[in-house]
Image: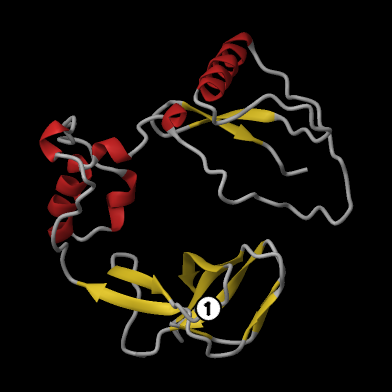
Amino acid sequence: MTLVRKVSIAPRSSQVVEATLKEQGDKLGTSSLFLFSQSMDLPEGIYIGNFVNATNESRKYQIVVENNSNMAHTLPRDSPLGEVEFSCQLIGKVSSGQDSASRETVSTEGCVPEADVDVEPQYKKPLDALLNEFTDLFATKGSSLGSTGLIKHFIDTEGKGPIRLRPYRTGQGQREELEKQIKEMLQANVIRHSTSPWAAPVILVVKKSGELRFCIDYRK
């Protein structure tokens, strides 16, 4: 996969770029199984993020490129970003160094993950078996999510701010739910107390399952 046009990426930032596959006959569909290996020739600090979308019929793809270094980098046109390997089946078994017999087995019978909608029928059973075998690697609730200190996130506000918005009014039921979720996230070290001059209101959004999702409204 190569870069369509020259791009410059500022330090500690990311940018969506267009890339294309070397073989014009290849195409990444919504149900394609493939492995992406980042090119070793990319400058230090440059990482390839998520595939965003196919842009048009010319088979160009939007990809997030991250620059985690402290200097700007320029990638010339046709720079190799990585290799795409297509696969028609799930092969082998992933070993995590832990005896699978000691894993807690969670039945997935009757459960269809939302991400499963675009998976072709012949891949559903092996995928379900793989997810069931490694259930301890997935967070079943928000409080089980972890965090990393390897990369510091930076938002360039262009010298504007700080912006401090008042919290939205909530009913007694929503207030109790907010306090409950905040307590769970504090205990799980997902969030921490802050005295920042920046502030945005929180809002509870109803999921399809009827549960309430904790969201922050940054629109203003």
Look at 23% across and 42% down and name the residue there: 134
Look at 57% across and 22% down and name the residue there: 186
Say which of 174 and 192 sits in front: 192
**Residue placed under numbered mark 1 in the picture:** 42
Q: Position of residue 27 (x, y in %)?
A: 34, 79
Say which of 212 and 63 sits in front: 63
Say which of 97 and 6 sits in front: 97
Q: Is residue 218 above or below residue 68?
A: above
Look at 59% across and 51% down and name the residue there: 151
Q: Is residue 55 left or right of residue 209?
A: right
Look at 63% across and 29% down and name the residue there: 203
Q: Give the tally of numbered discs.
A: 1
Label 1 packing within 10 angstroms: few (<14), some (14-19), many (20+): some
- The three-letter amino acid code for the residue at tag 1 is Leu
Instruction: Quadrant for the N terminus, please.
Output: bottom left
Q: In the orientation shown, which residue stands out farthest toward the left?
A: 101
Give the image quarter of residue 77. Answer: bottom right
Say which of 108 and 158 sits in front: 158
Callout 1: helix, strand or loop?
A: loop
Q: Position of residue 136 (x, y in %)?
A: 27, 36
Q: Is residue 141 above or below residue 115?
A: above
Q: Is residue 25 above or below residue 212?
A: below
Q: Is residue 97 left or right of residue 61?
A: left
